[in-house]
Image: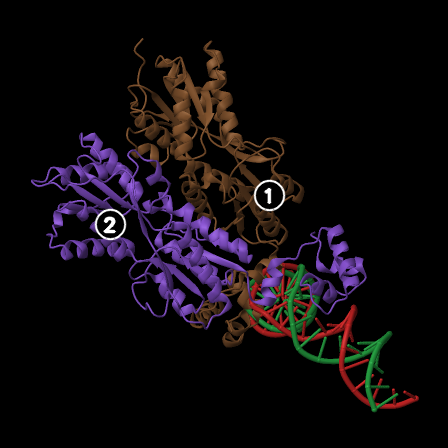
Chain colours: A brown, B purple, C green, D red
Amino acid sequence: MAVTIKDVAKKANVSISTVSRVLSDSPKISEKTKKHVRKVIEELGYHANLNARSLVQQTTKTIGVIMKHSASEAVHTTFIPEVLRGISYVCNKYEYSIRLSTGESEEDLFQDVLKMVNGKQVDGVLVLYSKKDDPVVDYLIQSQIPFVILGKPTKDVNKIAYVDNDNIHAAMDATQYLIKLGHKRIAFIGDDKKYEVTNARLAGFQQSLLANQLEICDEYIKNINYNYDEGVQVIHELMSLPVPPTAMVLTDDLNALIVLSALSKIGLKVPEDVSVICFNNSTISRVSNPRLTSVDIQIFQLGYEAAKTVIEQINEPNALKKSLIIPTKIVERDSCKKMIP
Amino acid sequence: MAVTIKDVAKKANVSISTVSRVLSDSPKISEKTKKHVRKVIEELGYHANLNARSLVQQTTKTIGVIMKHSASEAVHTTFIPEVLRGISYVCNKYEYSIRLSTGESEEDLFQDVLKMVNGKQVDGVLVLYSKKDDPVVDYLIQSQIPFVILGKPTKDVNKIAYVDNDNIHAAMDATQYLIKLGHKRIAFIGDDKKYEVTNARLAGFQQSLLANQLEICDEYIKNINYNYDEGVQVIHELMSLPVPPTAMVLTDDLNALIVLSALSKIGLKVPEDVSVICFNNSTISRVSNPRLTSVDIQIFQLGYEAAKTVIEQINEPNALKKSLIIPTKIVERDSCKKMIP
DNA sequence: TCATATAGGGATAACGTTTGCACAATGTAA
DNA sequence: TTACATTGTGCAAACGTTATCCCTATATGA
């Protein structure tokens, strides 16, 4: 059996209250006693049982991190490790730990969240995606637990704390970037339409075209679900159009990698024949061939701020549900080229 | 305040023991009472406090997953999401949940493990890497907690349960594959030498050369740490050798992607000028340009089996510390070519 | 001298469960 | 009728902490 506070108390010849106070470095205990108790703790290799502590303190020092359900194609993205890195960084700093959702299907995921929250296993929750009619978010609101969404909520925007990029603007910037290079026929290739990011970016793309009096052509709007064959198909459709696009906006760099390959397969060169700009600026953008001009959404920072916001919400549950917009920046590399008129 | 078992008991006019028994579907309770209590539970929206349960049952139904420390470059790999997917799958099935390590440095990581294990927050631990002189593993052994390593332990192989590929053999296969295509000058580019995988693969590579009476040339052995510039540098060094290699074995497909770009940068084509085979067969291999011939190490399966083994160890702590070798398979794509003599 | 702070630490009631034991009510066998 | 299982339920002791209240010296001030 593990060594408990009682064992320490007995061996140190003090009460368990004293040991507990030493643990929390209470000023009510003399330095002498502290030193003595600490020595015994050391000797016995004692470590507090955090479940017991959670039980009485009604707090777990743990946040629940909800990823997309694991059957989703999007979990392959380099987004996950990087955002986790940002979250870890903060959690480590504030001495919080992470409980990860394991749901395979959306329903599993929901049950998982239920268990975490109702089971009092977490003090707050961080949802790494945003989509319409998400039962998870509805439940979180109702449960009153502190939580933040990484992404823009689809409703109750004022009641929910969130951390996001301004994806509409970012997409406008990206599109504008291509337009400035002289491109007029620009395609948009998104990923999973279920999630809000994709919609926001599409909206930005369209607004930018409108603002520049360019025609919005439905045939230029596609999506790929991180699947090679699908990518080949989409590129085929796009490039065999009577008037094919000369540039593309991609919402993810893994998809951009696919597009790069698909274009090469039909003998088209980037950026000579087609310019490509993508979102995320993850490692992939930096190392592909050609290297991708990419909208840096600062994934680490997103995770960092999101985690920080959750912890702040936990510590001040009645504080304003503030939302944070992380700036984006276009990182120019080798995948875009000026149109020769 | 949250609704507790007492509230349910009161409202249902039964004792808390009865409610508890209904919760665990004990045969000692009549169907009638069960139905009634369940209805009350539903009405009140009651859900057991899992901390309290953990405390009395001395079990958490949670496993701790230890990644490499988050400052490590390797966390960018597509390995993480995929292995997490495998782990999630199993955890979900067995109703376990995941607590993730958050350590940024190696020391942080160690403290994190200490906290998890000593704090009784997990029933078992899954270590996602293997390296020499790892205090984490030493501690896990000493603490007697069930744990498994994903990778080959550097010592105490018989006392530690692990799940791994046969990396030596896999590397031999990969090398042999190139040799069969007629290559005689083969380079090896690993990643972080700190971890055991890299060493095993290097060993396999060298053994294969030996077995084929090919010279092992130190200048052909390099490594890249998921960094573009480093990759460019390494490729430069390699290809400006008096006798440059005609083929390469890479230990990671993200690194292979870098190599692809670096080669292209100096005007060399894959597979025409240089053949490339890599490990992991993650999404990247499938979508790069050219698509990479890759050793499929079955990442999902690794995660799946590792998690399953931990849970088995938890349920039967005295069972043999069995180890599992997940088979590998070369997936042929477009990055290797027969040498024209 | 007495009254009164004050510092240091002990007892004990929570926290929300599970579970071994006791026990009442009912059924069954002799 | 008595004795004894059987079935269903309640009581209360754990689990390992924290936190509130309380007590006892000793020091301080008048």
Label 2 sits on a secondary structure element that is helix
Q: Residue at x 31, y 28 (%)?
A: A265
Residue in the picture at 47% in, 19% down: A219
In this rendering, the count of numbered labels is 2
Q: Position of residue D25 (x, y in %)?
A: 58, 74
Q: Is residue A280 visible?
A: no
Tell me if residue B53 comes above or below residue A334 in the rendering. below
Left or right? Give the position of A290 relative to A37: left
Q: Point out the image quarter for the C terminus of chain A.
A: top left
Q: How far across and how far down the image is residue A88, in percent?
A: 44, 47
Residue indicated by mark 2: B174
Of the pair C26 and A284, the residue shown nearer to us: C26
| Image position, residue B130 (x, y; %) | 33, 58
Q: Dot 1 corresponds to which residue?
A: A146
* Chain letter belonging to callout 1: A
Which amino acid does the dot numbered 1 rest on? Pro
Q: In which chain is the residue bearing label 2?
A: B
- Nearer the observer: mark 1 or 2; the answer is 2
Horizontal side of A80 relative to B224 (left or right) equals right
User: Mark 1 and mark 2, same subunit?
Assistant: no
Q: How many C-alpha atoms fall within 10 Å of the one at disc 1: few (<14), some, or many (≥20)?
A: many
Nearer to me, D16 or A150: A150
Query: Who is closer to the viewer here, B319 or A280?
Result: B319
The secondary element bearing badge 1 is classed as loop
Q: Give the quadrant of residue A58.
A: bottom right
Q: Residue furthest left?
A: B242
The one nearer the camera, D8 or A150, is D8
Residue type, mark 2 in image: Ala
Q: Is residue B87 left or right of residue D29?
A: left
